[in-house]
Amino acid sequence: MQLSSATHMLSAARAEAERLGVVVCVSIVDAAAYPVAFLRMDGLALGCIDVCNKKAKTAALFHMDSADFALVACPGGGAYSLEQTNGGLTSFGGGLTIRDGSGGVIGGIGVSGASTEDDIAIARVALAAFS
Amino acid sequence: MQLSSATHMLSAARAEAERLGVVVCVSIVDAAAYPVAFLRMDGLALGCIDVCNKKAKTAALFHMDSADFALVACPGGGAYSLEQTNGGLTSFGGGLTIRDGSGGVIGGIGVSGASTEDDIAIARVALAAFS
Amino acid sequence: MQLSSATHMLSAARAEAERLGVVVCVSIVDAAAYPVAFLRMDGLALGCIDVCNKKAKTAALFHMDSADFALVACPGGGAYSLEQTNGGLTSFGGGLTIRDGSGGVIGGIGVSGASTEDDIAIARVALAAFS
Amino acid sequence: MQLSSATHMLSAARAEAERLGVVVCVSIVDAAAYPVAFLRMDGLALGCIDVCNKKAKTAALFHMDSADFALVACPGGGAYSLEQTNGGLTSFGGGLTIRDGSGGVIGGIGVSGASTEDDIAIARVALAAFS
């Protein structure tokens, strides 16, 4: 996950958040969940920072979007308690896996601060800007 | 839990994973949940490492397979929150208790990376190789 | 600490690092040490990420540059063990306090990856870009 | 860091420890400090396990052997408190950086359980087996 790609994704996410009239933070991590780039828009509730980081980590470490992860990593799901591994993960939407041209996982993006639907939409716009 | 037995189990687990065409990591711990041997197959999602360690720990520290542990350590179960003790445990299958000839617990094995069914199957093959 | 100022500082830090021919990561935090913006240049040793975060945190939470903090928070210093509070702080240079026009602390910047001298120089260039 | 290389290094380390008549544990991690393979010889003092893991992590995350890291990350060194970042690192010998043919860091190996000199010697034998 190169910095130039990550900053490009951050810019796209920020522009989409402004277009939607919402405030978010955005985290881009590499395939091992180490941070590459991050930004927080002015006025964000501070609790969202850890959330966007965990969304990005979930998508990178498990090779699946956090909304899909939520289907199994929850009470009653097939892998309840999975969400508490790796220092804490996120079992709702807003974290997307980033893949290279051949489908290999190279990182994750997490967005938090708006509604879950808007967080997901913003992350998708950012991911499309990368591809 | 001797190293020679642990490496024997790791080899059996790896061979079974290759036979099934899946990629997993395998952790063997002693009765106090300290690591004895570990391997991670190439290409595994990195989040599975902590999962296999916690599966092995769960089986060793509670003298029961993690699939059985899941029946009580979950919302609605008789011991909800038990899964959050000991630094985090695993409430789904893939962790098996290792016992000596007289039934005493000497360790645990955890497998993660494939479907829960395959993780369990691989752990059972490894355990059979030990017995 | 506004995002626009933080991204301006990140750009200045990155340009200075490129001019010096070094690779660093840069973290900007607010007065409460919550992240505002972050970037990691390609090829950085991954251990530096936590270091730059802790440098920024040290400067923000104690209202002093991490190089000054080091003079007291060390074995033999007047406040030995202070460096182990707040989840871990940094007792060497590369973290600078960010102040507004009237001298109030509004955040911290941390740089890590090059020599301590270069880390400090890069942080100073970024701070000058803010002022 | 491929599993086949890691298991080859573990075997070489174990053979050298047996030749020296000492008992150690050995940890191989990838460039992001995630475990690839691990073994603990029978009879080892349990506290050494965390030590060998931290030695391997130190070498991988800072691209330097833990004995060199010790020269700066210590009281009176140029980067005192660095040893407390990244969840705890090791400021003495026994951790070596693993590089590929072109010099890029691909992981780290840590050995603990014998004297520091023997730990270092064993790690070097394992590294030579890889190269």
Image: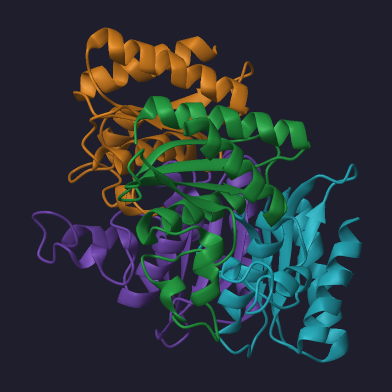
Chain colours: A cyan, B green, C purple, D orange
Please tell me which residue is depicted at 80% across the width and 69% down the height of the picture.
A11
The picture places residue D2, in percent across and down from the top left corner, at 63, 27
Residue B105 relative to residue C51: left or right: left
Give above or below for D70 relative to C5.
Answer: above
Residue B41 relative to residue B4: left or right: right
Give above or below for C116 relative to A37.
Answer: above
Please tell me which residue is depicted at 79% across the width and 56% down the height of the picture.
A98
> Farthest residue in the top direction?
D19
Give above or below for A4 relative to D118.
Answer: below
The picture places residue C114, in percent across and down from the top left corner, at 48, 42
Residue D49 relative to residue A41: left or right: left
Please tell me which residue is depicted at 38% across the width and 28% down the height of the picture.
B3
Q: Quadrant of residue B44?
A: top right
Q: Foreground residue, B4 or C117?
A: B4
Q: Is residue A46 visible?
A: yes
The picture places residue D13, in percent across and down from the top left corner, at 39, 17
Where, quadrant-wise, is the N terminus of chain C in this rendering? Answer: bottom right
> Farthest residue in the front direction?
B102
Q: Is residue C49 visible?
A: no
